Amino acid sequence: MKEIKVDVAVIGSGTAGMVAYRKAKENAEDVVLIEGGDYGTTCARVGCMPSKLLISAAEAAHAIEEAPGFGISPKGETIIDGVKVMERVRSERDRFVGFVLDTVDAIPSENKITGYARFVDDQTLQVDDHTKIEAASIVIATGSSPAILPMFEPAGDRLIVNDDVFYWQDLPESVVIFGAGIIGLEIGQALHRLGVRTKILSKFGLVGPLNHPEIIEYADKTFQDEFYIDTDADTLDVKKVGDQVVITYKNLDGDEVSENFDYLLAATGRTPNVKNLGLENTSLELDKRGIPIFDRYTLQCGSSSIFITGDANNDVPLLHEAADEGRIAGENAGTFPEVHAGQRTSPITVVFTDPQIALVGSSYNQLKETPNKCFVTGKVSFENQGRSRVMLKNKGMLYIYAEYGSGIFLGAEMFGPRAEHIAHLLAWAHQKRMCIPEMLQMPFYHPVIEEGVRTALRDANEKLHIGPGLDETSIECGPGI
């Protein structure tokens, strides 16, 4: 057993781990990066990038289908070559992974340790059966894995997760997806547009990360108009028959049906990779999920020299958040016992469906649960918004939340065209703590989708000026008022 002493040990080489390693190196001399699996981030290998490659192919196919609406008739039959679609997905995915591997290769070999790390105590790690590491500080950046519910196990080898999709050599004929979260919606709509018979079955009436019941209902109806989705599905049986999976469920009409699919894709969330870290050997206090309790501004676990970052802490499992957290955790690990709170940027979430989904700042549910907080909602529909109609993308709505009294912009929720771009404008305004009148003073070009934002801002501004005897039902408050 090899024994070494270091200033900082980083467990995991994903986005958070790589950033943490670099920041720790700026403040400490001896830093090691421990990796038990393949190098290359979740985003590059099986997440953000390959999913957007699949979505882009689906958008290209859908654009041909939509062309007659502009008076354009494509010549001949549209042929979707599944082999070529997946070939491009894999090729470009491997290119993105290659960039990450180049960064890993640049790390000196003596600073990289291969194997799975477990805690012996707060400052000691054992990597497989070959290396014991005594570290002044440790960063946990072990990422997450798809969650598999026991009800899916009868599907056998017909059960897949989103990671598996991006290794396909060809598109299948049919897929049933369980879960209407971000992954389920993105992959489900993309596969449908690429000619795969696709059904999405989910529970609890959820549509992605959407909060407001009016937007959820609108989005659910919009998706249902394009492909089969049941957000309150009653699944009766899952079994494998031959080389297919048979799902028995009650359809939207309440009838019991059985249907064969090539694959069952489980998109029912992800689980932090902390179970096998030996955390029971540390002094850390764990929550009910087994995750160390930590400060989200320092990423420090209690008063220890252990920090947890990225998907492993299950706070905000998004790439840009993982990078921010890696920076904070790596810097604090490198300077420990000196620890500083790092800046957390305004929350922003984007779902690359069509229409897209975006959330910024505080959500509707969060505001409704905030004690002594009153807010108004500015609304706009994109069905008659000029630029949206020009592009035949006139589906969706935007709700903007503002604090009643101060007029401060609190957050927004959108299901509509180009939401990924609108979300950034609104996130910047939220981070600057702008108020609604200030936002209305910003320039709005014509004709652009952003003019819809102005409409929602104007609606919110009118409601902020409600006086005695006017429509006070426009004001919503959290508990305590």
Image (spheres, rainbow, N blue to C red):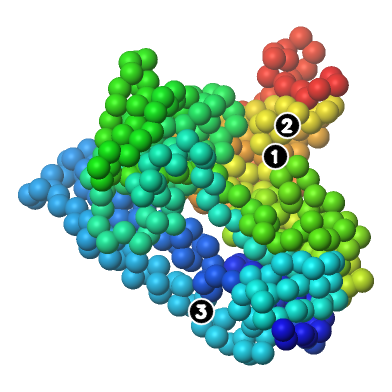
Residue depicted at 62% across the width and 60% down the height:
143
Query: Which secondary structure, mark 2?
Result: helix
Residue depicted at 59% across the width and 42% down the height:
359
Neighbour class for label 1 at 10 Å: few (<14), some, many (≥20)? some
**Residues at discs 2 and 3 in contact (Cβ within 8 Å):** no
Vertical order, 287 against 284 (above or below) = above
Three-letter residue code for mark 1: Ser
In-front residue for pair 192/355? 192
**Residues at discs 1 and 2 in contact (Cβ within 8 Å):** yes
Q: Which residue is mark 3?
A: 101
Vertical order, 204 against 293 (above or below) = above
For marks 1 and 3 on the same chain, the one whose residue lies earlier in the sequence: 3
Q: Which residue is mark 1?
A: 362
Q: CA distance from mark 2 to mark 3?
A: 42 Å
Q: Quadrant of the N terminus?
A: bottom right
- Outermost residue, top direction? 469
Q: Position of residue 81 (x, y in %)?
A: 19, 57
- Outermost residue, left direction? 76
